[in-house]
Structure formats: C-alpha cells, structure tokens
Image (cartoon, grey):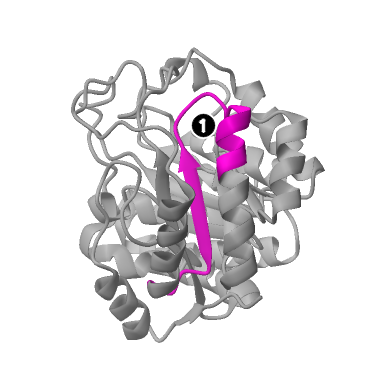
C-alpha cells in the first residue's frame, strides 16, 4: 500500500509539471530522498513528462576540446585549471581544418549538435575569429547545430557568434549559488548568470547545466534546478563528477547510479520541457544503468569528453535501439 501511495505521489508531481507548475523545495528533496523501491515509479513519472515533450527521440551531442589546459581559473573539478597537476594535453585553439574534421566526426556519430569547447576565462578576439571562421564553413556545408562554450562572453563576442551561425551557447552554473565559492574563486556565480543572459539577449539558445557530486547538499541540487528553470535554459547538461587525480576534488568519490537517476528525474520534473542531457561522468556513475537515464533525459553526449574518455559510439547507438527509442537528426 505504501509503495502504491508513493507511486501516486510521483504521478501527482508529473501532473503538476505538465500543468506548468513548479515543484516545491520539499517535493524536490523528496525525489532525491526516494527509497530504492520507489525508483521505478519515480522514473515512470519522469518518463510520462519526457514522452509528452520529446516522445521517444534522443538528441545526440558531440564535443571537441578546441583548446586544452592553459586555463587561469581555479575550478576545483577541472583537470585543465591552474590548480591541476593532471597529465593532460595542453594546446592553443585548434585550427579550422581540425574543427571541420571534428564536425564530420559528429555527423558520423549521428550527432545533431557539435559543441566547440575551449578552456579559459574567455576568448580573445583572435580565438573568437578562429571559431567564427570554422562555424561559418560548417553551417554552409553540414547539417549540424553548433554550440559554443568559450567561457565568459562580452556582448560584442556574443553577437559575432550569433552572426556566424552558432545556435547555442553553453556556460554551466556548475553548482549552487551557496556552494559556488567552495568550487571556484577566480570568477563568480553572478558572472556565469550574466554570460548566459548575454548569450540569450543576442539570439543564442542558452545552454547551462550542473556538475553533481562536488559536496553539495540535496537542497542545493534542488536549488540548482530552480535556478536553471528561472534562467530559462533551453538545454541542461547534467554532469556527474568524474574525479581526476591531480585536481582538488580528486577524492570526492563517485555519484552512485541510483542517486544519479533520481537527479535526472528531479531535473525533468522541475524543467519539464527542456532538453535534459546526460553529460560527463555518465559512464562512470551510471555504469550498467545508463539505459534507465533516458527515461528522464532526452539527450546524450557521445564520444569523449574534454579530458576523459566516453564509451564506444556503437554501444550508445545499440542502447537507444534496444530501448525502442529513435535518434533525432537535424536538417538544414
């Protein structure tokens, strides 16, 4: 009887989400605190919302690390930060030929969105010009949406990206406002909010997400979801910390798979119509439960991440087919 009542509770939250009403903080915390036997009813409620807005389609995104390391910021999770001693490749902005090759690889992997990501506080004019030149050619020749993630943006830079044909700009909030200073001190939470708003003001679709597993509380995770709902982020990547030796968070541990699924259900029910993407760390945290993630999320990163490896693309394609889902393609 208790399990039946809890199932009704999750269904009531799904109904609320579909009606455009926001969950309360207490409801959000109850999702993250759900017992193991409640997980399938919770995922069913999340899937009801996911199916309403996205049917059984899955969006695939592929990123390229366009500039690696050499970053002056002190983000505690990042192997590319100034604090990191992780043995990673370090190089300046990739040339146009390499960025175009990455775009062709994204198409081969059936990705609809190609994400050009560069480490650093923000792009120089020269770096921005290199990205713009590559984007213009990609947009003219390939059926791909382009997402750029280049750090803090100034207004003129946002306009140049939009004029070049960039569809989306990613700048993650990463963690809650309360927890932010424990993770990064070289820039502020407010600067991240401002960059997302600047991109949006210039016609770029706002993409902003989080990293779960950096010492935040359940309440702060719910507050992250509320913040992204208020920010009206169109796309929300949910990363699970993949702790890297040589970074300040090297010993943070791994988000357990059942908890990761509850986080995805939370974001689906609080941001019902938004693209919820299972991003970095999914293989590490979800492991054999990765297929269940797509009952809440409607999007995946495929291939490798910035400095960590992803799983073979054939496994992702097979997983989607086995679920009876369909890859969503983008056409010019």
Looking at the image, which is closer to me, 92 or 177? 92
Residue furthest top as drawn? 185
Left or right, 214 with respect to 137, comes to left
Query: Number of callouts in the render?
Result: 1
Q: Quadrant of residue 4?
A: bottom left
Looking at the image, which is closer to me, 275 or 153? 153
Q: Which residue is mark 1?
A: 220
Is 112 inside the magenta-drawn segment? yes
Q: Residue 234's x, y, as percent?
A: 66, 54
User: Does the rendering let one see residue 25?
Assistant: no
Secondary element type, mark 1: helix
Q: Quadrant of residue 91?
A: top left
> Circle 1: is it few (<14), some (14-19), or many (20+) Cα within 10 Å?
some
Placement of the C terminus among the 4 image quadrants: bottom right
Q: Residue 94's x, y, as percent?
A: 42, 42
Residue drawn at point x = 59 percent, y = 71 percent:
141
Is 132 inside the magenta-drawn segment? no
Q: Residue 289's x, y, as percent?
A: 27, 64
Q: Is residue 326 above or below residue 233?
A: below
Magenta residues, as a range?
Answer: 109-130
Q: Is residue 191 above or below residue 146?
A: above
Placement of the N terminus among the 4 image quadrants: bottom left
Q: Quadrant of residue 250?
A: top left
User: Does the rendering let one see residue 185?
Assistant: yes
Residue drawn at point x = 31 percent, y = 54 percent:
304
Q: Residue 172's x, y, as percent?
A: 54, 38
């Amino acid at each position: 009887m208790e399990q039946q009542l809890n199932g009704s509770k999750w269904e009531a939250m799904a109904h609320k989400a579909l009606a455009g009403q926001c969950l309360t903080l207490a409801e959000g915390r109850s999702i993250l605190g759900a017992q193991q036997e409640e997980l399938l009813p919770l995922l069913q409620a999340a899937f009801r919302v996911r199916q309403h807005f996205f049917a059984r389609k899955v969006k695939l995104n592929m990123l390229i690390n366009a500039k690696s390391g050499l970053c002056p910021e002190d983000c505690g999770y990042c192997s590319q930060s100034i604090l990191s001693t992780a043995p990673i490749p370090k190089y300046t902005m990739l040339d146009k030929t390499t960025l175009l090759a990455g775009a062709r690889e994204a198409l081969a992997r059936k990705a609809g969105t190609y994400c050009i990501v560069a480490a650093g506080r923000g792009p120089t004019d020269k770096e921005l010009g290199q990205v713009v030149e590559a984007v213009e050619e990609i947009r003219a020749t390939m059926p791909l949406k382009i997402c750029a993630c280049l750090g803090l943006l100034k207004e003129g830079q946002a306009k140049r990206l939009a004029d070049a044909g960039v569809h989306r700009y990613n700048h993650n909030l990463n963690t809650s406002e309360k927890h932010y200073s424990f993770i990064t001190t070289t820039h502020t939470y407010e600067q991240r909010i401002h960059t997302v708003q600047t991109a949006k003001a210039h016609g770029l679709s706002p993409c902003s997400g989080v990293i779960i597993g950096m010492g935040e509380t359940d309440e702060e995770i719910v507050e992250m979801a509320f913040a992204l709902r208020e920010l009206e982020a169109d796309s929300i990547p949910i990363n699970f910390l993949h702790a890297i030796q040589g970074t300040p968070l090297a010993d943070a541990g791994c988000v357990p798979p059942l908890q990761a699924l509850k986080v995805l259900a939370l974001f689906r029910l609080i941001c019902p119509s938004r693209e919820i993407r299972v991003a970095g760390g999914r293989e590490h945290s979800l492991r054999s439960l990765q297929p269940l993630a797509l009952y809440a999320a409607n999007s995946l990163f495929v291939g490798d991440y910035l400095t960590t490896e992803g799983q073979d693309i054939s496994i992702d394609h097979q997983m989607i087919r086995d679920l009876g889902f369909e890859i969503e393609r983008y056409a010019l």
